Image (cartoon, rainbow, N blue to C red):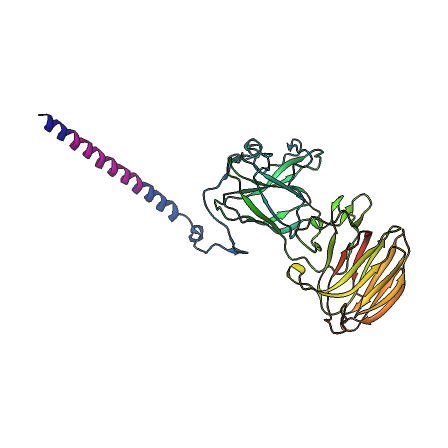
Amino acid sequence: MKNLSLFTLVFALTALFFSSCEKENDIKDIASEKDTEAHAQLPAEAFGTEPVAEIDSFFKEIVTPEIEIVSDSAYIERTDNPVVIKLEKGQLEKNSSIGCGSDFTSSTGRGGNHVTSWHYSRFGLNADLDGEDRLYTFYVGSTVDDIDFLLTNTYRNLAMILFKNSSTCTSGSCLQSLVAYTTSSSTTSDGLYNIRLTPGHYTLVVDNPIYGESSFRLRMKCPTPSCFKNKNDSFSSYYTGNLTPQASHWEKWNASSYCDAYVYGNYNYARLYYDNGCKPDVLLKLCNHSNGFYRVKFDMWVPYYRSAYFNVQKRLSYGNTSNEFGGQVYFNSNGSGRLSIAGRNYNFNYPKATWFRVEIAADLWGNSSLYVNGYRVVTYPTRYSSNTIYGSNRMSAIDFYTPYTDSDFYIDNVQVTDY
C-alpha cells in the first residue's frame, strides 16, 4: 500500500511537470506569433539587415543598455536650475582639458564618485553608475559636427555620458543639458559617434557601477579641419585657457602632452613659455599646401631677457616622428635673431617688449621670403629644407615651440592669405 502511494505521487508530479512545460511552450509560441505580426507591419529596413558600420575598428552595438531614459525631461536644458557637481581643486582628472586628437590613458579606480545615479536621474536617466568616475572638460568656440569620443583598452563595461555645462557656473561643473550617452555592454571598447557640438563648455564623464572600475584609453577624434587660408585668427572668440582645444587648426605636436599654448581671453592673444620642463609645442595647420602663392603673417611680442622660436613644417608625418623641416627662425634674448635654412644662417634684429610683424611670403613653385618687423631678411628657393637644398615644395604647418628655459613669447593676429 505504501509503494502504491509513492508511485501515485511520482506519477502526479511528472504529469504536472509536462503540463507546465506545455503551457510554457504555448506562451513562447504566442509571443513569437505576436512578434511576427508586429514585424509584418514594419518596413523591411526596420529589421537592420545591413551590417553595422565600422569606425576605426569600433563597432556600434545594439544591446541591453547600462543607461536608459525613463523620463521625457532627459534632453531638456536646465537653464535656470543646472545640476551642480562641486569639485575641489585636484578632483578633475589631471590634465583633464581634452581637445581634438587628445589621447589619455587612465582608470576609474580611485577617481572618486563625483556623478551619482541621483545626478543622472535629474536628467531622466536610469543609470546604475555609483562607482568611481573620471571627469574631462573642454570648450567649443563654434559649432562643429561629427565628433567622436572613443574609449578602448577596457576590461569592464564602462559608460560615457556627455553634458553641456551652464555658462553661469562659478564652482565645479554645472551640468545644464544631456548631449549623448553610450549604450554598449562591451567590456573592451565603447564610443560616442558623430556628435554635434554647439559653442560652450562641456563635461564628459567616464563612469561605471560599484566595483566595476577599469583602466581605459580615451580619445577625442575631430574631422579633418578645412584649410587655414584667407583667414584671420585674432583669438577674439577664445576663452582664457589652453589653445588647442578651442580650434581645429591648432594642434599639439604631441597630442598626449599636457603642455599647451595659453590664451588670455581678456586680451585676445596666445602665450607660449617654458615652465618647469613643460615646453609648449603647437602647430598652425596649413593643410599641406603644395602649390600657389601664400603669405603667412602674425604679430609677436618677446619680453626682455626672453627668447622665441618657430619653424616651417614642409611635410608632416604620423605622430610627427619623421617630419620635413623648412626654415627655423630663432629670436634670441638680446634682440638678435637668425633664419637657419639649407644649412646656412641669415641674421636679423628685432624689437624687444613690443609687438612686431613676422611674414613668410611663399611661391611654392618658386622662392620664399622672410620679413621681420617690416624688413626682408632673405629670399631663398621654397624647395630648401632646414639642412639641404633638396626638399619638397610644400608648406604644411607653422610650428611654434619653446625649446629653451628662457623661451617666452606671445602671438596674435595670425593670417594666411593669397598673395
Q: Quadrant of the N terminus?
A: top left
Q: Residue at image x 53%, y 44%?
A: 182
Q: How many marks?
A: 0
Q: Which residues are magenta?
A: 9-28
Let me know if residue 316 is in the magenta part: no
**Residue in the foreground of this view, choosing between 175 and 285:** 285
Let me know if residue 20 is in the magenta part: yes
In this view, the residue farthest toward the left is: 1
Q: Quadrant of the C terminus?
A: bottom right
Residue 22's x, y, as percent?
A: 24, 38
Magenta region, main secondary structure: helix
Q: Is 303 situated above or below 135?
A: below
The quarter holding residue 229 reads bottom right
Residue 404's x, y, as percent?
A: 79, 54
The quarter holding residue 341 reads bottom right
Q: Residue at image x 63%, y 36%?
A: 175
Residue 203's x, y, as percent?
A: 64, 41
Residue 193's x, y, as percent?
A: 56, 50
**Residue in the foreground of this view, choosing between 389 and 265:** 389
Horizontally, residue 216 falls left or right of residue 269, namely left
In this view, the residue farthest toward the top is: 1
Q: Is 273 situated above or below 213?
A: below
